[in-house]
Image: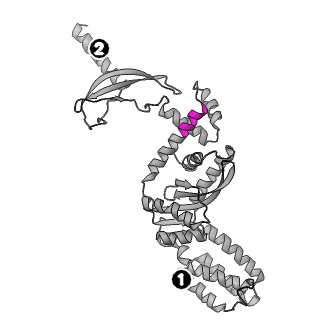
């Protein structure tokens, strides 16, 4: 072939090589300029299960005259590729310890320390937290749990977006302290725009929901469990003339009618048995009357799911996230820090692809 033909072929090969090794940036990081001049290249060694090095190009913006590096997809300033950092995190989420994760990766010719794996886990947890930080959440599931951390069993409060099932945050909060629960939930509700919270029937959550002025759905599983247990005991202890009230209460609880609060209030008025004295122990009839008035006063908290289709009738989404977090706690024999517990909630507790 002639010289022009050889030059043309060489240029075509260079264009093909450029398209395979580098993707030009779309905008300048400083001024959003779109015209660049290549300003050099360097071979960057990387830690990866498939690659050992990549070509990194430097560009000069023709608008602001500044230069910057443009990394290939999946590579950044870190020595490890993004793929390897996610792979190490997945190994930890699947139940491996930090050192066992290093052992698994060594089979692929990758040498990492356990603290490097720990930093990879914290990075992925922080990315997950930042993604969720400002996403709007209409329905927030809240539940307390006891998790072993720093050698002690500590109370924590977990918040989960019940729309997507993604954990939102976690805090060292005892659900029995309404003031602590309010301090924990108030900024979360305001930042995410929460309209409904789903919890169990603990009195602290009722107080906090009223102060935050949000709808409150009580988990039907918790409600039916404790009310059913109490009605079963009352059925064996109340006088025979009041057994029909117990049966009627069971029916109302099973059907959840819209006017259930008024029906329960009428039953309460019919069981007009005054107490013997405040210092006296509660009789079975007193317990029945207390149950009726409590259900009647909080009836609107049991039926939010009936008029809002986005609200689940149980808090199973939060329970599942806590369950996965507790399983991870057993495999590592308890969390060593609050950051590790938060990482387990956001990564292992999410049960979703991240």
Q: Name the residue under label 1.
A: 259
State the residue at coordinates (60%, 63%): 175
Residues at marks 2 and 1, CA–CA distance in whole angstroms: 84 Å
Q: Residue 10 carries which label?
A: 2
344 sits left or right of 68 in the view: right
Q: Which of marks 2 and 1 is nearer the N terminus?
A: 2
**Magenta span:** 112-121
Residue 155, picture quadrant: bottom right
State the residue at coordinates (61%, 46%): 337
State whether the magenta stretch is mostly helix, strand or loop.
helix
Does residue 352 show up magenta in the picture? no
Look at the image and tell me whether residue 330 can be seen: yes
Quadrant location, the N terminus = top left
The total number of labels drawn is 2
Which element type, helix, strand or loop, lies under badge 1? Answer: loop
Tag in front: 2 or 1: 1
Residue 202, picture quadrant: bottom right
* Identity of the residue furthest to the top in this view: 2
């Amino acid at each position: 072939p002639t010289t022009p033909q050889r030059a043309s072929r060489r240029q075509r090969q260079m264009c093909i090589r450029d398209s395979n090794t580098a993707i030009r940036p779309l905008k300048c990081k400083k001024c959003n300029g779109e015209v660049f001049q290549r300003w050099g290249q360097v071979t960057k060694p990387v830690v990866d299960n498939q690659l050992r090095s990549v070509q990194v190009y430097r560009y000069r913006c023709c608008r602001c005259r500044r230069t910057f590096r443009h990394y290939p997809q999946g590579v950044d300033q870190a020595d490890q590729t993004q793929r390897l950092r996610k792979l190490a995190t997945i190994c930890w989420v699947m139940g491996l310890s930090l050192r066992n994760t290093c052992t698994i990766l060594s089979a692929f010719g990758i040498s990492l320390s356990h603290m490097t794996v720990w930093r990879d886990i914290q990075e992925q947890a922080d990315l997950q937290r930042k993604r969720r930080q400002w996403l709007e959440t209409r329905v927030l599931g809240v539940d307390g749990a006891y998790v072993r951390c720093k050698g002690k069993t500590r109370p924590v409060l977990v918040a989960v977006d019940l729309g997507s099932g993604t954990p939102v945050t976690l805090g060292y909060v005892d659900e029995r302290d309404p003031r602590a629960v309010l301090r924990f939930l108030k900024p979360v509700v305001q930042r995410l725009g929460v309209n409904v919270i789903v919890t169990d029937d603990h009195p602290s959550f009722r107080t906090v929901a009223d102060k935050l002025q949000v709808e409150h759905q009580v988990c039907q599983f918790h409600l039916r469990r404790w009310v059913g247990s109490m009605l079963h005991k009352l059925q064996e202890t109340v006088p025979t003339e009041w057994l029909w009230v117990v049966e009627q209460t069971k029916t109302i609880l099973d059907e959840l009618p819209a006017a259930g609060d008024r029906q329960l209030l009428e039953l309460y008025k019919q069981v007009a048995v005054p107490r013997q004295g405040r210092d006296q122990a509660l009789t079975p009839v007193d317990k029945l009357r207390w149950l009726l008035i409590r259900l009647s006063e909080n009836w609107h908290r049991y039926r939010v799911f009936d008029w809002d289709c986005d609200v689940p009738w149980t808090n199973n989404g939060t329970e599942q996230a806590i369950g996965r977090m507790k399983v991870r706690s057993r495999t590592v024999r308890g969390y060593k820090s609050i950051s590790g517990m938060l990482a387990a909630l956001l990564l292992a507790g999410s049960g979703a692809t991240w």
